[in-house]
């Protein structure tokens, strides 16, 4: 698991596709009745990111960095589908007063949840933790798991604010780009899938 972060590039299209994916097996009997088995309690996410216009250093005086090198550098560093990295989901990336549990007087550890109620493991900066509306400093936050020094009181609402990433990998082992003009490329569509 790398700590590398998918770059935000000016040439990214705004039409990012975001798809929740479950794993279900369906067996249909001769009578037509179905037996269904679910193999995931939460979805994985697939992303398709159009990179319509990717520039190379020297394209213009306003090209601050080599955008092509940034995306290719990440792809080559993680060896395509082999290693994971961090991605800022365009919809689900910031919590603000988001619930992640209720105290019961005995539990001291709680997993942070995103705005869709799914577990969060990778924070983007510090998290602010609140117990019954009061800002609290927990004993630790490791991989999104909040540990309190003493158990929050029975019925105490636990909320948090902060930014987070999704851990993903490339959903492709090859990455094709097309040169549009000198120092300018169509970066194609980058496909990612979340990992657990």
Image (cartoon, helix red, strand yellow):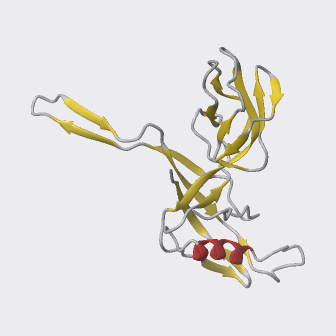
Q: Is residue 79 above or below residue 96?
A: below
Residue that lies at the very extreme toward the top in this rendered image: 155
Residue nearest the viewer, comparing 116 with 109: 109
Task: Decide which of 1, 179 is in the foreground and name it.
Answer: 1
Q: Is residue 20 visible?
A: yes
- The correct choice, above or below, for 67 with respect to 3 in the image is below
Please name the residue shown 63% across and 47% down the image: 143
**Location of residue 136 by image quarter:** top right
Tell me: residue 169, above or below residue 58.
Answer: above
Left or right? Give the position of 80 relative to 58: left
Identify the residue at image location x=74%, y=73%: 67
The percent coordinates of residue 135 (x first, y second) are 83, 29
- In which quadrant of the rendered view does residue 29 lie? top left
On screen, residue 80 versus residue 114, left or right, reads left
Question: Which residue sits at x=48%, y=39%?
Answer: 42
Q: From the top left corner, tell me how far across and down residue 3 is, in percent.
A: 66, 62
| Quarter of image, res 102 | top right
Rendering coords of residue 16 (x, y %): 62, 52
For the image shown, how many numbered marks are present on the structure? Answer: 0
- Between residue 27 and residue 3, name the one nearer to us: 3
On the image, the x and y values in percent for residue 44 come to: 49, 47
- Would you say residue 93 is visible in this rendering? no
- Residue at coordinates 49% horizontally, 62% vertically from top-left? 171
Task: Classify the position of the N terminus by image quarter.
Answer: bottom right
Residue farthest to the right, as pictured = 61
């Amino acid at each position: 698991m790398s700590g590398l972060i998918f770059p935000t590039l000016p040439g990214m299209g705004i039409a990012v596709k975001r798809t929740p994916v479950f794993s279900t097996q369906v067996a249909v009997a001769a009578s037509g009745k179905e037996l269904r088995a679910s193999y995931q309690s939460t979805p994985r996410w697939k992303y398709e990111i159009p990179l319509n216009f990717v520039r190379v250093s020297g394209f213009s005086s306003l090209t601050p960095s080599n955008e092509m090198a940034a995306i290719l550098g990440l792809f080559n560093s993680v060896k395509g589908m082999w290693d994971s990295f961090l991605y800022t989901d365009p919809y689900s990336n910031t919590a603000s007063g988001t619930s992640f549990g209720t105290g019961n007087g005995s539990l001291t550890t709680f997993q942070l949840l995103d705005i869709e109620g799914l577990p969060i493991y990778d924070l983007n900066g510090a998290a602010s933790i609140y117990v019954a509306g009061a800002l609290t400093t927990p004993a630790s936050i490791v991989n999104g798991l909040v540990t309190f020094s003493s158990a929050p009181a029975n019925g105490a609402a636990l909320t948090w604010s902060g930014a987070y990433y999704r851990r993903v990998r490339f959903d492709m082992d090859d990455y094709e780009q097309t040169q549009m003009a000198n120092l300018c490329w169509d970066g194609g569509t980058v496909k990612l899938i979340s990992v657990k």
